[in-house]
Image (cartoon, grey):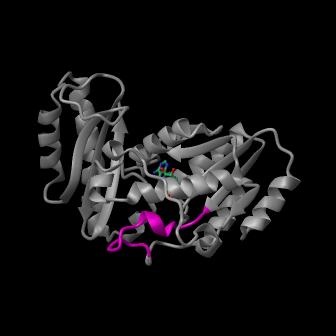
């Protein structure tokens, strides 16, 4: 496995591999089974797989956890090696960004709602770094988790709008046995908080059951979800279609139920696709 610290090293490596299909898994590290499922999918569908590990400063708001975001680079590299990753790109902010940099601006009506309403400019930062990474790695396939549903939507939209020749492959959400969606931020949770964090997935499983028993009233379901989430501080509870338009009346397909909430000082997100 090649560890690529600089853009030049990445470019040289890219020239040295003559591959039919290159898969790419961008991450911020502190890898868990969720990330590993993306890597495994890429490995199974491509001749070569590159993983990037980069905590991108531009997607964090000033009051967020950028400086204390979990870092486990040694363990991450071991996991990548075990899974047979071909190259790991560990770029440096000095190389990734420029003074007076060009930024990507996703459509405001899709990127300043939900996550973007709670975290303005977050998706500007996400798309800017993802486009830089795409241009450097030039993959055929890129793998993203449904866990970050709005991010996945906006990246797909960017790829379409900018005519990028990259297939975006959505991957299922990986959960712990008790239902908690895996997240690098779960390490912040105390054991009591971890119990409370289960309210997110419980509220989503409840909503899915309601829909299965033909309660299609989005407002009614959202109210009941808020009761389940109580007393957590809720960021949002929303039900949207695949275009991220809010639904009043739910359908039995193309529906995403999303939740964001603080457990103590840790902000968690989760969702379920119907
Ligand atoms: P991150 O390191 O948080 O930026 O995540 C890197 C990629 O892993 C993103 O595409 C996430 O959506 C995906 N991911 C994170 N957690 C999970 C999970 N529990 N299940 C599936 N994919 C995930």
Number of numbered callouts drawn = 0
Query: Looking at the image, is 63 positioned above or below residue 48?
Result: below
Regarding residue 93, the answer to whether it shows in the image is yes
Q: Give the camera-side residue of 189 and 253.
A: 253
State the residue at coordinates (70%, 37%).
Answer: 45
The N terminus - image quarter: bottom right
The C terminus - image quarter: top left
Residue 142: x %, y % from top left: 61, 44
Start and end of the magenta stretch? 53-66
Q: Is residue 29 magenta?
A: no
* Secondary structure that dominates the magenta span: loop
Regarding residue 50, the answer to whether it shows in the image is no
State the residue at coordinates (36%, 50%).
Answer: 178
Q: Quadrant of residue 203?
A: top left
Q: Residue furthest bottom?
A: 67
Q: Give the camera-side residue of 109 and 228.
A: 109
Q: Is residue 235 left or right of residue 165?
A: left
Query: Looking at the image, is 214 positioned above or below residue 17?
Result: above
Q: Quadrant of residue 2?
A: bottom right
Q: Quadrant of residue 8?
A: bottom right
Residue 84: x %, y % from top left: 74, 54
Query: Looking at the image, is 50 positioned above or below residue 59?
Result: above
Q: Give the camera-side residue of 170 and 93.
A: 93
State the residue at coordinates (76%, 55%).
Answer: 86
State the residue at coordinates (68%, 63%).
Answer: 89
Residue 155: x %, y % from top left: 50, 44
Q: Give the camera-side residue of 102 and 160.
A: 102
Residue 120: x %, y % from top left: 32, 59
């Amino acid at each position: 496995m090649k560890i690529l610290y600089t853009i030049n090293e990445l470019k040289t490596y890219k020239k040295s591999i003559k591959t039919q299909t290159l898969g790419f898994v961008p991450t911020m590290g502190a890898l868990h089974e969720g990330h590993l499922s993306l890597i495994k999918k890429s490995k199974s569908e491509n001749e070569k797989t590159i993983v990037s590990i980069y905590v991108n400063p531009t997607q964090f708001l000033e009051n967020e956890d950028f400086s204390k975001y979990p870092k486990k680079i040694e363990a991450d590299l071991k996991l990548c090696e075990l899974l047979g990753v071909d190259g790991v790109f560990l770029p440096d902010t000095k190389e990734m960004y420029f003074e007076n940099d060009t930024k990507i601006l996703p459509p405001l009506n899709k990127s300043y709602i939900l996550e973007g309403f709670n975290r303005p400019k977050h998706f500007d930062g996400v798309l800017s770094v993802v486009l830089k990474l795409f241009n450097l790695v030039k993959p055929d396939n890129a793998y993203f988790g449904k866990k970050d549903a709005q991010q996945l939507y906006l990246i797909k939209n960017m790829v379409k709008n900018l005519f990028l020749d990259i297939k975006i492959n959505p991957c299922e959400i990986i959960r712990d046995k008790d239902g908690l969606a895996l997240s690098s931020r779960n390490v912040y949770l105390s054991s009591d908080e971890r119990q409370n964090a289960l309210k997110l997935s419980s509220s989503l499983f409840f909503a899915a059951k309601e829909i299965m028993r033909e309660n299609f009233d989005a407002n009614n379901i959202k109210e009941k979800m808020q009761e389940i989430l109580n007393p957590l501080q809720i960021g949002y509870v929303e039900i949207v279609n695949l275009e991220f338009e809010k639904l009043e009346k739910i359908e039995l397909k193309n529906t995403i139920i999303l939740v964001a909430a603080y457990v103590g000082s840790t902000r968690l997100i989760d969702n379920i696709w119907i």
